[in-house]
Structures are given as structure tokens and as C-alpha cells.
Amino acid sequence: QVQLAESGGGLVQAGGSLRLSCLASKSILSIYHMGWYRQAPGKQREPVASITGGGTDYADSVKGRFTMSKDNAKNTVYLQMDSLKPEDTGVYFCSALATPATTRRWGQGTQVTVSS
């Protein structure tokens, strides 16, 4: 089972940028689906961005501001977050779904706080 470790969260002012990283414990080359999710206080976890063999998808709320990428050689996926807004505040989680039939794996999360 792959293990995931996020890093790169922090406190930033509105309009600023952060880059989150998610290091996997094994090769991500053949993983079916990798995604970033976030959970704001008192709210449910929601998808932010994902990468599959078909390309990259984004939530409407982050389109044009966030970019997800992966580096197979480093077993790492990234989430570049620009033009951050206070409503982007939350704990950001990395996830991996090896195949459609397996259980989704989660990292421990990293806190992102955007001040107004």
C-alpha cells in the first residue's frame, strides 16, 4: 500500500501563493488516480484537483488559480496555488487510488491558512 506525505502548507496573505507537495512511498507511475482534497472547518472534505490517465481536472472554485502536476521520477505530485483567497483555507490532503477496485489512500494533511 502506498503511503503519502504532504508538505508545503502555511500561512499566506490573500493574493499570495503556496506550493504543496505530496511524496509517495512507491512509484506513482501506474497509479490510476491521484488527487488533492481540502477540508475547511465545519465542512466536508471536497475535491480540489486530480490527475488520471485522461488528464487533469479542477474544481470550479480553483480553475485558473491552481495547477496540479506530477513528477514520476520523484514519486511526487504538486499543487501550485496562486491568487489565494481566504475561502481556500483548510487542511489539504493528498490521495491515491491505485486502481478503481482498490481503497483510496490518504496522507495526513497539511494546513493552509489564507488571511484577508
Image (cartoon, rainbow, N blue to C red):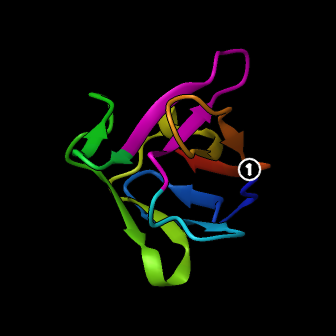
Residue 38 is inside the magenta segment? yes
Q: Could you say where residue 112 lies in the image, as x and y percent from the top left?
A: 63, 50
| Image spot of residue 14 (x, y percent) | 44, 51
Q: Residue at x 41, y 50 (%)?
A: 84
Q: Residues within 10 Å of mark 1 (few under 14, many from 20)?
A: many
42 in relation to 60, above or below: above
Give the x, y percent position of residue 71.
Answer: 42, 76
**Residue at the image position 73 percent from the left and 50 percent from the top:** 107
Name the residue rendered at 28%, 49% in the picture.
53
Taking depth in this image into account, of 114 and 95 the one nearest to the observer is 95
- In the depicted structure, whether residue 60 falls above or below residue 98: above
Is disc 1 placed on a helix, strand or loop? loop
**Relative image position of residue 76 (x, y in whole percent):** 54, 71
Q: Residue furthest bottom?
A: 73
Q: Is residue 74 left or right of residue 105?
A: left
Which of 85/116 is in front? Answer: 85
Picture quarter containing residue 37?
A: top right
Which residue is at 72% across, 24% downward? 41
- Residue 73 versus residue 115: which sits nearer the camera? 73
Question: Which residue type does callout 1 highlight?
Answer: Gly
Q: Which residues are magenta?
A: 31-50
103 left or right, relative to 84: right
Q: Residue furthest right?
A: 108
Classified by dominant secondary structure, the portion drawn in magenta counts as strand
Residue under numbered circle 1:
107
Count of numbered circles in the view: 1
- Asked whether residue 81 is drawn in magenta, I would say no
